[in-house]
Amino acid sequence: MGHHSKILIIDDDRPLLDSFSAFLEDSGFETLTAPDGKSGLDLFRQRRPDLVLLDMRMPGTHGLEVMNEIRELAPDTPIIVVSGAGVLDDVVHALRQGAQDFFIKPVHDLSLLEHSVRRALEHADLKREHTRYQQRLEEDIDSRTRQLVEANRKLQEEIRRRDAAEAAMAASLREKELLLKEVHHRVKNNLQIISSLLNLQADAATEDATRRSFMESRQRVASMALVHEKLYQAEDFSHVDMGVFLRELIGQHTCAADQCGAIATHMSEESLQLSINQAIPCGLVLNELTSNVIRHAFPGNRTGTLRVHMTRQNQHAELVVEDDGVGLPPGFSASEAESLGMRLIFALVGQLHGTVEFESEKDKGVRCRIDFPMPPAPYAAKGEPDKKITAEVPILKE
């Protein structure tokens, strides 16, 4: 702070008081004067000066008492003390209580007084600016702290809300999984009941053709029941392990054809997962092809082998069913065949949005290849090798 700052001079020495006042006014300051401590304090309360020049020894109120009063009224107001040569102890006490500077009477070089006044005012300005900056900083910290506390509160609320939502979703998912498991269980049981009824009808039939039709239908129903059984047993209700399915399906066929114990089945360790929407038609196709091989490929006492394998190639699955039996009759066209089994095969491959082709050579067997698209396996990492399922069944007849 420079010119026009108010300086309060409190001194009972009138010539010194007038000298200080005149000099400081000539230096650009506004001065206020008081001849004793009491009037000086009254003037301080009224005018709030920027700096005080204070004599330590005056009649009435001691300079240290005046200084303490000023400190209580305005702690940041700088005070410069003036004292006689014989009262230096007062100066020491004043400096300890925060006085900015001191002068010993008589003051011969008033320019030193002006320099001390300006330095004290500048120091007070810096101190006030520092206080304001610190207050702003504290206010900013308080504001940021409140914002962080509020943001943290909202975050905790959001976390609790999401935790509650996730818990509700998990509970709902468990409930739906239990319900879906029960549905698959009941569908499997109902299909097995239908299969048993068809078996009873087959036993009651008097004609071989009728009995065969019932047994073929029973095996188709059993194939669908097997899909639901695998889903019921699986942890993931959305996919069927075709390796396990294939092994059990072929086992059902060989046992139904009175080949239990005479047919050995080999299955590779790898497996292939299909969704229920693909597993059912694929299982029915396998059922028809396997049934045809067992019933027609090896007439009489002929022995042979049935091979089944499935491979995933990127976004496609390939199913191959082949045998080394007698082959298809000359001129036979699978796509134009009128049998229910062949019509089912083409219809089911259509449901899979795939293609089917038959290759046959007399006395060297039939090879059926089916290709259909499939989504990426959800469990497979990028770059995982293709999965392959293989079953090789020797057909042994006495």
Image: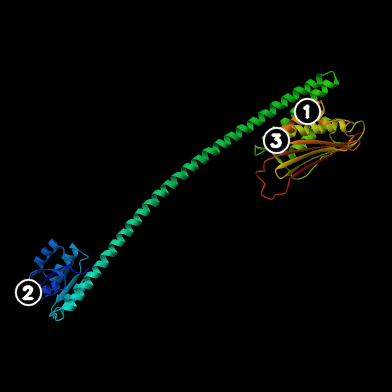
Q: CA distance from mark 1 to mark 2?
A: 131 Å
Q: Position of residue 278 (x, y in %)?
A: 70, 35
**Residue 19, can we see it?**
yes
Q: Report the disc number at residue 278.
A: 3
Q: Residues within 10 Å of mark 2 (few under 14, many from 20)?
A: few
Q: Secondary structure at mark 2?
A: helix
Compare residues 182 and 54 and report the one nearer the observer.
54
Residue at image point 75% right, 32% down: 284
Compare residues 393 and 62 and report the one nearer the observer.
393
Q: Is residue 358 above or below residue 338?
A: below
Compare residues 6 and 227 and report the one nearer the observer.
6
Q: Position of residue 203 (x, y in %)?
A: 81, 21
Q: Residues within 10 Å of mark 3 (few under 14, many from 20)?
A: many
Q: Which amino acid does the dot numbered 2 rest on?
A: Arg
Q: Is residue 213 left or right of residue 36?
A: right
Q: Which residue is mark 2?
A: 14
Q: CA distance from mark 2 to mark 3?
A: 114 Å
Q: Is residue 100 left or right of residue 308?
A: left
Residue at image point 81% right, 19% down: 204
Q: Which residue is mark 1?
A: 343
Q: Quadrant of the C terminus?
A: top right
Q: Is residue 209 above or below residue 243?
A: above
Q: Is residue 148 left or right of residue 263?
A: left
Q: Residues within 10 Å of mark 1 (few under 14, many from 20)?
A: some
